[in-house]
Image (cartoon, helix red, strand yellow):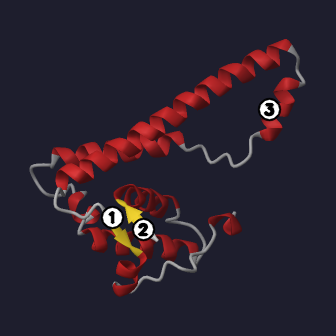
Amino acid sequence: MIYTRKDLVRSYLSALSYMNAAEPLKSDAEGFTCALQQAFGIDLPGFLDFSARPINPLAFLFQRAVGTFRAQQDGALEEGWLVMKLENQGPSGVHLLDQYLNLRGCVAETSHQALALMQDILSTAWPEAPETVTSATLLALGFDDRNRPDPMEYW
């Protein structure tokens, strides 16, 4: 498989989300993120260490983008029941549903923009990092990506 910096950002966000998840999901998310960081030559924990002074503005901006992205994630896995209930309430329910769907579109756009910002920050902070890495690279670093756990099995 081929991984990009976007995959690194997504794995970092997943590792944060799965920090308190059941094993093996937690350790897999952490291991995958660590392997990707090594493969790309990007040290996010060191980059995001705010004990150093002066604070790196790129790290600060990255952390703000992480916060923005995570704030958009409400944890709703299935909203079909909500749509059905609102549609059954008649015109007022349909109106509320339209407003809600517009809001969800804004949430999706905000998440997309936050991901793009994080990727751009990584490209700026590590311009020499490779554009892609492969499963073979991860395996050489000790992480086998062939049999990763499915997060849906742990909800």
Q: Quadrant of residue 31?
A: bottom left
Q: Secondary structure at mark 3?
A: helix
Using the numbered discs, state the Cα–Cα distance from disc 3 to disc 2 in whole angstroms. Answer: 37 Å
Using the numbered discs, state the Cα–Cα distance from disc 2 to disc 1 in whole angstroms. Answer: 6 Å
Instruction: Classify mark 2: residues with Cα within 10 Å, few (<14), some (14-19) or many (20+).
Output: few
Q: Which amino acid, by three-letter code, is at mark 2? A: Ile
Q: At 49% from the left edge and 65% from the top edge, which residue is drawn?
A: 19
Q: Name which of mark 3 and mark 2 comes first in the sequence.
A: 2
Looking at the image, which is closer to me, 51 or 108? Answer: 108
Q: At 82% from the left edge and 39% from the top edge, which residue is drawn?
A: 81
Label pair 1/3, CB-CB below 8 angstroms: no
Rendered position, 148 above or below 132: below
Q: Is residue 105 left or right of residue 152?
A: left
Q: Quadrant of residue 114?
A: top left
Label pair 2/1, CB-CB below 8 angstroms: yes
Horizontal and vertical percent position of residue 118: 33, 47
Residue at image mark 3 = 83
Q: Is residue 129 left or right of residue 66?
A: left
Q: Secondary structure at mark 1?
A: strand
Q: Is residue 147 left or right of residue 30?
A: right
Instruction: Please name which of the two marks, 3 or 2, marks the residue nearer to the observer.
Output: 2
Q: Name which of mark 1 and mark 3 comes first in the sequence.
A: 3
The numbered dot on residue 2 is: 2
Residue at image mark 1 = 132
Q: Secondary structure at mark 2?
A: strand
Q: Which amino acid, by three-letter code, is at mark 3? A: Val
Using the numbered discs, state the Cα–Cα distance from disc 1 to disc 3 in whole angstroms. Answer: 40 Å
